[in-house]
Image (cartoon, coloured by chain):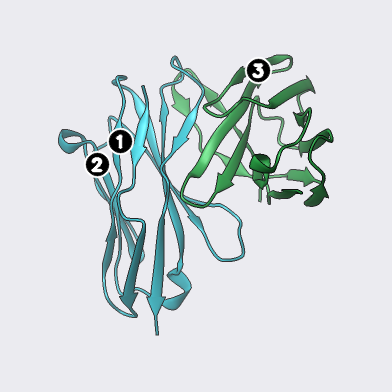
Chain colours: A green, B cyan
């Protein structure tokens, strides 16, 4: 199994509070991703990173920010959590080169409830 | 723009029946990759297969088989002689070539229920 750890695995917070989810990998993969999973929407990309300090927005990035100061860590921050951000969040990693795009390996998920 | 459509929201079959999960994709790129993932009730996401756009050969792995047709932009997944353990949500995904964006775009998933 790919070495991907998400923390916390479960969190309950109140509207308006900041929340940071951490993704840590031991695979030295260059590419890291944050997705959210909601019923009826599947997996939607929030932000992704293609290297240290290199990040870009996905399809549902409003209300989220990310940072990647080290290859192994990718942080997702909700500056002021809202109830619409209640979801299961998955981190994923991949590797690719000029001739090949690898598959995504996923963490176990972090369940966030915003009251 | 990339898009993946899984029109079947939920499918129920009786054990030992064959079942096909549909996946239709859109991309402007000529080089791309397609994937299938399984999410059992325990919640983890399990990689099943990767296919690049230049390889239209169908693939079989045990009871699983995949049919890739560029002419119809489809990458369908068939489970033969389904079992209760196949009950899960299945996701199809698309990623463009290494020279394109780095995104992986997923469909909304198909929930498969296999009844004993």
Mark 2 sits on what residue? B74
Gap in Å between the C-alphas at discs 1 and 3?
25 Å
Position of B13 with respect to A12 (left or right) is left
Which structural element holds mark 3?
Answer: strand
Seen at 43% across and 49% down, the residue is B91
Seen at 34% across and 80% down, the residue is B15
* CA neighbours of label 1 inside 10 A, class few (<14), some (14 to 19), many (20+): many
Instruction: Check the picture and name the quadrant holding the N terminus of chain B.
Output: top left
How many discs appear?
3
Residue B61 drawn at (x, y percent): 36, 59
Mark 3 sits on what residue? A55
User: Up-down: is A96 above or below B106?
Assistant: above
Viewer-closest of B30 and B109: B109
Residue lying farthest left?
Answer: B71
User: Up-down: is B64 above or below B25?
Assistant: below
Gap in Å between the C-alphas at discs 2 and 1?
6 Å
Gap in Å between the C-alphas at discs 2 and 3?
31 Å
Label 2: chain letter: B
Instruction: Check the picture and name the quadrant holding the C terminus of chain B.
Output: bottom left
Position of A87 with respect to A19 (left or right) is left
Q: Earlier in the sequence, mark 2 or mark 1?
A: 1
* CA neighbours of label 2 inside 10 A, class few (<14), some (14 to 19), many (20+): some
| Residue at mark 2 shares a chain with residue at mark 3 | no
Asked if the residues shown at circle 2 and circle 1 are in contact, with their CB atoms under 8 angstroms apart, the answer is yes
Mark 1 sits on what residue? B25
User: Up-down: is B57 above or below A53?
Assistant: below
* CA neighbours of label 3 inside 10 A, class few (<14), some (14 to 19), many (20+): some
Viewer-closest of A8 and B20: A8
Seen at 48% across and 32% down, the residue is B104
Label 1: chain letter: B
Which structural element holds mark 1?
Answer: strand
């Amino acid at each position: 199994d790919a070495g991907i750890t998400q923390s916390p695995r479960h969190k309950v917070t109140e509207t308006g509070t900041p929340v940071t989810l951490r993704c840590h990998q031991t695979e030295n993969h260059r590419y890291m991703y944050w997705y959210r999973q909601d019923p009826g929407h599947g997996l939607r990309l929030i932000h992704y990173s293609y290297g240290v300090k290199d990040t870009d927005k996905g399809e549902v990035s409003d209300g989220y920010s990310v940072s990647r100061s080290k290859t192994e860590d990718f942080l997702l921050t909700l500056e002021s959590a809202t109830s619409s951000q209640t979801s299961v969040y998955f981190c994923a990693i991949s590797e690719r080169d000029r001739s090949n795009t690898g598959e995504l390996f996923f963490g176990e998920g972090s369940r966030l409830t915003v009251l | 723009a990339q898009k993946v459509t899984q029109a079947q929201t939920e499918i129920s079959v009786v054990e030992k029946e064959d079942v096909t999960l549909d996946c239709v994709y859109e991309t402007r790129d000529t080089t791309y990759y397609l994937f299938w993932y399984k999410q059992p009730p325990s919640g983890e996401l399990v990689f099943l297969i990767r296919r690049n756009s230049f390889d239209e050969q169908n693939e079989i792995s045990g009871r699983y088989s995949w049919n890739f047709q560029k002419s119809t932009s489809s990458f369908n997944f068939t489970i033969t002689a389904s079992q209760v353990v196949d009950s899960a949500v299945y996701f199809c995904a698309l990623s463009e070539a290494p020279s394109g964006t780095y995104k992986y775009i997923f469909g909304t998933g198909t929930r498969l229920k296999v009844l004993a």
